Amino acid sequence: MTAQRIDGNALARVTREQVRAEVATLKARGLTPGLAVLLVGDDPASQVYVRHKVADSAEVGIHSLLERLPAHTTQAELLARIEQLNADRSIHGILVQLPLPKHIDAQRVIETIAPHKDVDGFHVANAGALAVGRPGFKPCTPYGCMKMLEHIGYSLRGKHAVVVGRSNIVGKPMAWMLLQASATVTVCHSATAQLATVVRQADVIVAATGIRNLITADMVAPGAVVIDVGMNRDDAGKLCGDVDFATVQYKAGWITPVPGGVGPMTRAMLLVNTLEAAQAAAT
Ligand code: NAD
């Protein structure tokens, strides 16, 4: 049996089309959604990410404002700029690209963004809302994973979902979303004993560790749904995930490829969040 692939590129394309249509409706009412992207310093990977975010925004009609700030920008300067954007009525979403230079406290920066403009969903107000099942912005990567599960018509109710990784941007919010969908959720991490034994019990596996080939075929129950969040490089420098795709694809029921899986959906969900921020401002 070969697993069915969940095509993140195709689903992201459809999602962008939906956003584009809704943006057009807002524009017809005189409101253009605006996204501010702040990049501090010149981290090469971050440069690529922000370029994508700006290009994706343009594609769906969202106005984006990319601000490149020098690496020596002080924390006070960055916070002051965020405060200005908080008050700017043409900007509905604010995103500060991480990682930030070491002299800046990233948590402090995130918490300076007004929660209703926090389209990354990293502010404690949004994290707390997610934890208690209240409306708020959801972090784009786990939100995209949920959309992929929804797309294949997978009912999470009563299923055992195992999340491998407990970061604030992926693992933890993923666990809350799966719990909200009535799955039984286990969260594994670097101190988990018997990882293979736990993962083998999963109906749904979400791998988000940054460790290439951590999830091997012997850890996957036949027919399981495997969502691979990892973004790693193999020996040839090619992008690969946390899942040993070559073998797991013959064991799983559904699997997301890397590239072409979670990555494009993460990008698409930022547009969804920005649209929602603008819609909320319009009401
Ligand atoms: P992180 O480094 O913050 O967290 C990694 C997590 O993995 C930690 O909670 C750690 O406990 C766990 N872990 C480490 N070793 C482990 C082991 N041997 N067994 C079990 N758990 C282990 O990383 P992150 O920001 O959550 O990102 C995880 C991966 O997802 C990275 O590869 C990152 O590049 C990727 N990522 C991809 C997207 C996307 O859009 N596709 C978005 C965000 C992150």
Image: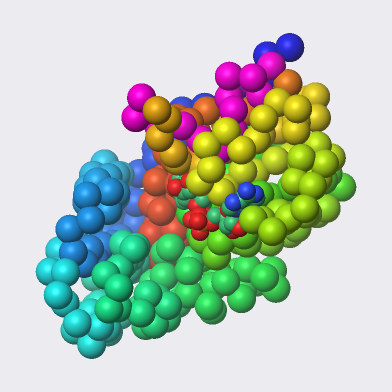
Quadrant in which the N terminus is drawn: top right
Residue drawn where x is 66% and y is 24% of the image: 248
Residue 34 in the image, given as x and y percentages of width and height: 27, 62
On whether residue 247 falls in the magenta region, the answer is: yes
Residue 120 in the image, given as x and y percentages of width and height: 43, 63
On whether residue 248 falls in the magenta region, the answer is: yes
Quadrant in which the C terminus is drawn: bottom left
Residue 92 horizontal side relative to residue 70, left or right: right
Residue 170 in the image, given as x and y percentages of width and height: 55, 56
Q: Quadrant of residue 192?
A: bottom right
Residue drawn where x is 12% and y is 69% of the image: 70
Can residue 34 be seen here? The reply is no
Residue 238 horizontal side relative to residue 124, left or right: left
Residue 178 in the image, given as x and y percentages of width and height: 71, 53
Residue drawn where x is 44% and y is 39% of the image: 232
Above or below residue 219? Residue 115 is: below
Q: Quadrant of residue 102?
A: bottom left
Dominant secondary structure of the residues highlighted in magenta in the image: loop
Numbered range of the magenta stretch: 236-250
